[in-house]
Image (spheres, helix red, strand yellow):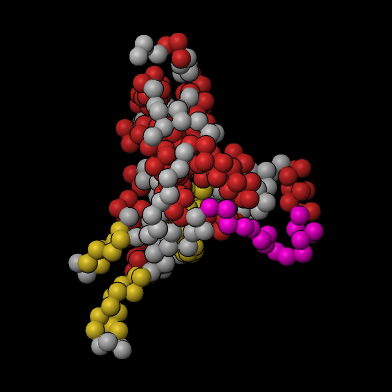
Amino acid sequence: MTDAPSMTTTDAARLVGGVLDELERAVVGKRSSLELVVAALLAGGHVLLDDVPGVAKTLTARSIATTVGLDFSRIQFTPDLLPSDITGGTVIDLAAQRPAFQPGPLFAELVLADEINRAPAKTQSALLEAMQESQITIDGATHRLPEPFFVIATQNPVESEGTYPLPEAQLDRFLIRTSLGYPAVADEVELINRRIDRGTEQPTLQQVAAPADVLAMRRVIEAVHVDPIIVSYVVTIADRSRRHRDLTLGVSPRGSLSCVKLARAHAVVAGRDFVTPDDVRAVALAAFSHRVVLSDEAWARGTRAASVMRELVDSVAAPSWQDAPPQ
């Protein structure tokens, strides 16, 4: 691992801006979604993209790997995929005539776990354990995963036949759950025109940052100031979710921590060394919506967790700096 260079908030914001500008050459009209995904990378979390086919989920993952210089691995999850297929395992080294560990596709800096809900529970758990611990243990030996280690998992919310939905406790391991969605008409026209003009299927992107820069930016994020009134704001939203009539399970303390972590990363993306209520509002839905469980009545009405959380976030008044106690 290369030592991470020293970096200021301004340096980090400039570098992230360059990464996002390069990503937009491939993924058209999705700046806000790309900011969330990149913020999750900087915050040291993982991303679940829950979206229909053909809206650039795979392209987003590949493009981030290219622009940041991360080793890339794509795993297509299927019902017959075994845990050892992704983690690797012990094999016989014929040359040395002794057992040796053969790393699996998880040993990459950016892993695309495509259609994670199509794999059985044991394989999903192997991935999620690696995400949580940044290491795997095989035959009593512990193997560290590379640093940075970033997982972008995808799932198709439309086709549910033959899938294994992730339980809420496992969804909670993702820092954010978001979607790209269909592009606006003008953006889709631009996308097609760019494809015609370049004459190749995939755009050629340039590397803008390096893995060591990601580690440096993570240190910058740890220095971002979070005022106590911001902490109270986040916890108030989480607490109200635990008492909401349409939810049987509200946001956990892990969810509150994740929201603050993501808000700090969002502040760095914006070029600030302090978190504002706008940072919290920008990341709250992506950080909270997959951590709550609808009541049976709300589910029967067709209510969506994201809609409940949007209403809840809007109902909590954002604090002003005048509310902050004197230093």
Q: Is residue 41 above or below residue 238?
A: below
Q: Where, by quadrant of the figure, is residue 147 drawn?
A: bottom left
Q: Position of residue 101 (x, y in %)?
A: 30, 74
**Numbered range of the magenta stretch:** 194-209
Q: Report which quarter residue 123 is drawn in.
A: bottom left
| Magenta: main secondary structure | loop
Q: Is residue 49 visible?
A: yes
How many numbered marks does the figure carry?
A: 0
**Residue 153 drawn above or below residue 285:** below
Q: Is residue 53 above or below residue 295?
A: below
Q: Nearer the viewer, residue 285 or 194?
A: 194
The residue at the point 39 percent across, 27 percent down is: 226
Q: Is residue 286 magenta?
A: no
Rendering coords of residue 148 (x, y %) = 40, 54
- Quarter of the image for residue 2 reads bottom left
For this orientation, the residue located farthest to the front is 6
Residue 124 visible, this orientation: no
Q: Is residue 198 magenta?
A: yes
Establish if 172 lies above or below 252: below
Q: Residue at x 48, y 36 (%)?
A: 9
**Which quadrant does the C terminus fall into?**
top left
Rendered location of residue 288, percent (x, y)? 43, 34
126 displayed left or right of 265? left
Looking at the image, which residue is at 55% across and 45% down? 15
Residue 201 in the image: state x and y as whole percent. Answer: 70, 64
Quadrant where the image shows the N terminus: bottom left
Q: Is residue 200 left or right of residue 126?
A: right
On the rendered structure, is 133 left or right of 46?
Answer: left
Determine the residue positioned at 62% across, 41% down. Answer: 31
